[in-house]
Amino acid sequence: MKLWSGSFSVETNKQANDFQSSIHFDSRMYREDIEGSKAHAAMLASADIISNSAADEIISELDRILADIESGKVTFTSDNEDIHMNIESLLTERIGQNGKRLHTARSRNDQVAVDLRMYIKREISEICGGLKSLIEAITDTASNHLETIMPGYTHLQRAQPITFAHHIMAYAEMFFRDYERLADCYTRTDVSPLGSCALATTTYQIDRNMTASSLGFSTISRNSLDAVSDRDFVIELASALSIIMMHLSRICEEIILWSSHEFSFISLDESFSTGSSIMPQKKNPDVAELIRGKAGRVYGNLMGILTVMKSLPLAYNKDMQEDKECIFDSIDTVKQCLSVFVPMFLGIVVNKSKMYNAAAEGFLNATDCADYLTRKGAPFRDAYTVTGSIIKYCTEKGLKIEDLDISELKSFSPLFDEDIYASLDLLDCVKQRNAPGGPAPECVLSHIEWMKKQLDQIEN
Ligand code: ARG
């Protein structure tokens, strides 16, 4: 029997009932729902709205319901529509009259908003932990590759020599910003809507600050209509998760490229690769590919929630129930991707000589040659032109710049001296680039140290 059967003359249509039920996906908020109800009951008693004994009975039965759910003794039903009504009706079944007092000065509209905010806060903290492990994996790997030369690319064309440490620390920065974005999103989620009730608060003298602080919220919402109709915090999280997936898809794309025969910069541990059912030589980077692919569904979820919320009039509308599957899927996907990415990344074997040889082909030290001439007094544009003709000459002869002897070099410019060879050495090229943020080992090392300090400050 429905709660509203007193004012309705017919029963809910079976199809409509199943259609609007959300219990199959919102049951995952059972802990938050029970916690929220306990705080609400305690507040009702302290504000003399219900008796202390009623509140005590409600609270201890809610604890038993929690234990029963966790030990698998409870079966939820779509007849009770959602997690909120399932728990309330269990409570009433078990304790009778006092169970019916719980929903005083409350509505499912503020209840679902408070549950979802608590759930999201918990998940944000978990995802932040996942990002922290990822950044740690990157900084630890980078520490071992401060002098591992590789080509740096623009337009996927070899450009200038950098190091593997410098390259992967770029990702550490991206994931650190992702962490900060989540922390920021947490702040805006950390606002209690409880007490806003259906849309216009209540005639009871409730204590909103009491429930907020007992549920661990930093503050309370300032407008009851906004509090029950706002899902910005969901959209913001969906967006931050999309950005994480975008970053993961970029590093996965590079892992896929680097592990290809064409690059052979790295090899993946066999435990994170798969073979082919027909081609015995294959070792496929499926995990990296799948993470790259899963960015699609997380972006889709963001579009889904944005579209659900578009043009909705105030305050609560049932459309908003559609927020949950989207955000739950994005949360699950990101957590899963982070947890499989980290061990896969740590299992990567770097082929230093392949990386070095790739950096040694393709005149990656051409800018260094031009810089050398500029340091000796040539205007940079002239040095650039001279270097261009050297490259043309070398390309025709199949040589590198450093293969030319000093007299050949001097025929291009009298400014060349024996010290040019040191300037063309790839490790030297990298070491010279020691402006803050550059690939010079000392710069990357201080970046790694800075990052480790940031990670140390993050509480687990
Ligand atoms: N299951 C609903 C949701 O997720 C809870 C709120 C329902 N409120 C209502 N008045 N129908 O949005």
Image (cartoon, grey):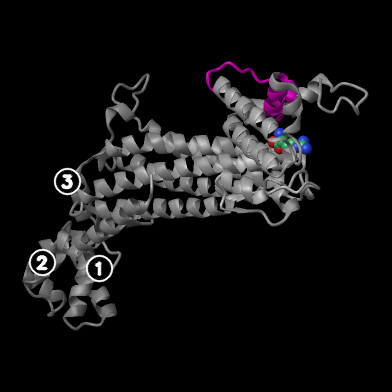
* Residue in front for this viewpoint, 120 or 384: 120
Q: Secondary structure at mark 2?
A: helix
Pointers 3 and 2 in contact (C-beta within 8 Å)? no
State the residue position of label 3: 353
The amino acid type, in three-letter code, at marker 2 is Ala
Q: Which residues fall within the magenta stretch?
A: 70-93
The amino acid type, in three-letter code, at marker 3 is Ser
The amino acid type, in three-letter code, at marker 1 is Thr
Give the spatial CA distance, label 2 vs label 1: 14 Å
The quadrant where ligand 1 appears is top right
**Residue 26 location, x and y as percent?**
63, 31
Q: Secondary structure at mark 3?
A: helix
Report which quarter residue 270 is drawn in: top left
Report which quarter residue 44 is drawn in: top right
Give the spatial CA distance, label 1 vs label 3: 22 Å
* Left or right, 342 with reference to 2: left
Q: Secondary structure at mark 1?
A: helix
State the residue position of label 1: 367
State the residue position of label 2: 422
Q: Quadrant of the C terminus?
A: top left
